[in-house]
Amino acid sequence: MENEDELDNIKRQLHDLLKGLVIKTGLGEIYDDYTDTVEFNLGNITIYSRGYYHQLDITKEDQEINLDHYLETAKIIYQEVKKRYEQLQKTNELKKSRIKAEAIFNKTLSLDNLEDK
């Protein structure tokens, strides 16, 4: 039960972060329908966060993977998105126009082991 609560919390935080990133960077897409779906590319994976269904999926190498039971993987993705978002904020503060959001978010993310430990 505790893991479910933690996973729900991470999914909610990730969804909000992804929505903010799409709005701020123009990368990704927010679908204008009741599902409240955010689609965001993070390197070699595409993240789909569906707020209405409280569902988190990724597509990696043309394979769709539902992360609704993968707490550790969801944590890794959330931490990586947050880290890159903070990196983006620093580049914006330093006015380094040569470093763009695309360069930050297009870096490959390794998710070799998709099972909870």
Image (cartoon, rainbow, N blue to C red):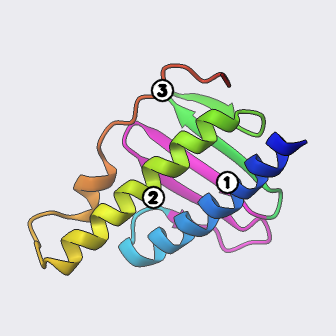
> Which of the 4 image quadrants contains residue 89?
bottom left
* Residue linked to disc 1: 10
The residue positioned 45% from the left and 54% from the top of the image is: 81
The residue positioned 33% from the left and 53% from the top of the image is: 105
Question: Would residue 14 appear left or right of 25 to someone viewing this image?
Answer: right
Amino acid type, mark 3? Glu
**Label ID, residue 61:** 3
- Tag 2's secondary structure? helix
Question: Would residue 23 appear left or right of 49 to someone viewing this image?
Answer: left
* Residue 109 x %, y %: 39, 36
How far apart in space, not on screen, are marks 2 and 1 (Cα)? 11 Å
The residue positioned 10% from the left and 72% from the top of the image is: 96
Indicate which label's residue lies in the foreground, 3 or 1: 1
Which of the two labelled residues, at mark 3 and mark 2, occupies the earlier sequence position? 3
Foreground residue among 56 and 70: 70
Q: Residue furthest right?
A: 1
> Which of the 4 image quadrants contains residue 65?
top right
Q: Is 99 placed above or below 62 here?
A: below
Q: Is 59 placed above or below 117 here?
A: below
Amino acid type, mark 1? Ile
**Label ID, residue 82:** 2
